[in-house]
Image: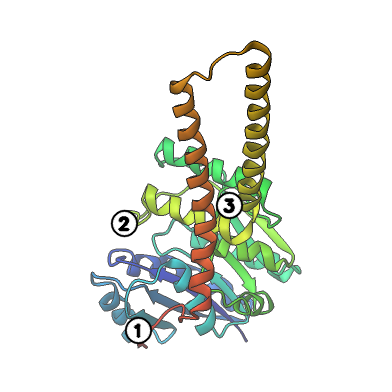
Amino acid sequence: MSLLSVICPCYNEEESVALFYRELMKNTEYFQSQNVEMELIYIDDGSKDGTVAEVKKLISEDERVHLVSFSRNFGKEAAMYAGFEKAKGDYIVTMDVDLQDPPSLLPEMFGYIKNGYDSVATRRVSRKGEPPIRSFFARMFYRIMKKISKTEIMDGARDYRLMTRQMVDAILSMTEYNRFTKGIFGWVGFRTKWIEFENVERAKGETKWNFWKLFLYSLDGITAFSTAPLMLASMMGVFFCVLAFLMIVFIIVRKLIFGDPVSGWPSLVCIILLTSGVQFFCTGILGQYLAKTYMEVKRRPIYLVREEL
């Protein structure tokens, strides 16, 4: 029989652990008919509530359930990478434990895999239930990424994705510390089928992703899969150099022809503030790439395990 590994990153999801397990196991009969066994791997990302205790209860009842608990919170990207490393399956799927990734889609997704696809990915066609401002900036992020990156990143893409072992091995070969998995999925390629579904609200608890965390996550994605900001900084530098040269010529000609004294202190202050702001902005862009490089060369582990069952 083949093996399907289900990877579930968890951070303070005490209320959702058992609920997700029950919903997932509704697919057991289907996968048995396809000669596929399941293993469920909960990746505890340093939870501070009773998430680990709830998973241990399931382990005592079902030998298919496994636990990998981090020494602290390393983030969802590290949790997914750990799941990929621990998974033994011929097929691997990543899912959120809050049931925003409907387990009921798994049979349909597996059907496409059996028909020759290497990956079946999901995307939301609506953002019902999300704050309007957050939805607006999310859509803008995907539009920007489409224009500045060669890697395919679909609008509304979820981390809910079923993959073959070959594709997961390709992802594991990318051992970078600063991970943006949505971009990595697109970068490795392989034949992918996209499935659309309506947004599903969380079954229990509250989201751990606030606006600031999503903003920083978007910066990680831009710096990881595009050098367009560096090109923008270079073009702005060239533009202001040319503009400064033209203004110098203009002032000299005006003085020689019309004899006008140099004036306009308010406008001069505005120009200084503008150019200084642009310089700091470009320096910030360089700093982002330098910071990513700094973290990469230190070669720290992506995660540390405190307990594994």
Question: What's the distance in space between the residues labelled 2 and 1, CA to CA?
Answer: 21 Å
Quadrant of the rendered structure where residue 175 is?
Answer: bottom right
Which residue does the numbered mark 3 point to in the structure image?
A: 123
62 sits to left or right of 85: left
Three-letter amino acid code of the residue under disc 1 = Ile
Point out residue 118 in the picture as x, y percentages from the top left corner: 71, 70
Residue at left offset 48%, top offset 19%: 264
Residue 28 in view in this figure = no
81 sits to left or right of 193: left
Q: Tell me which label, 1 or 3, sits earlier in the chain.
A: 1
Three-letter amino acid code of the residue under disc 3 = Arg
Which residue does the numbered mark 1 point to in the structure image?
A: 59
In the image, 51 versus 189, the foreground residue is 189
129 sits to left or right of 145: left
Residue at left offset 62%, top offset 44%: 237
In the image, 59 versus 69, the foreground residue is 69
In the image, 171 versus 93, the foreground residue is 171
Element assignment for label 2: loop
Q: Tell me which label, 2 or 3, sits earlier in the chain.
A: 3
Marks counted in the figure total: 3
Point out residue 173 in the picture as x, y percentages from the top left corner: 63, 79
Which residue does the numbered mark 2 point to in the structure image?
A: 204
Q: Tell me which label, 2 or 1, sits earlier in the chain.
A: 1
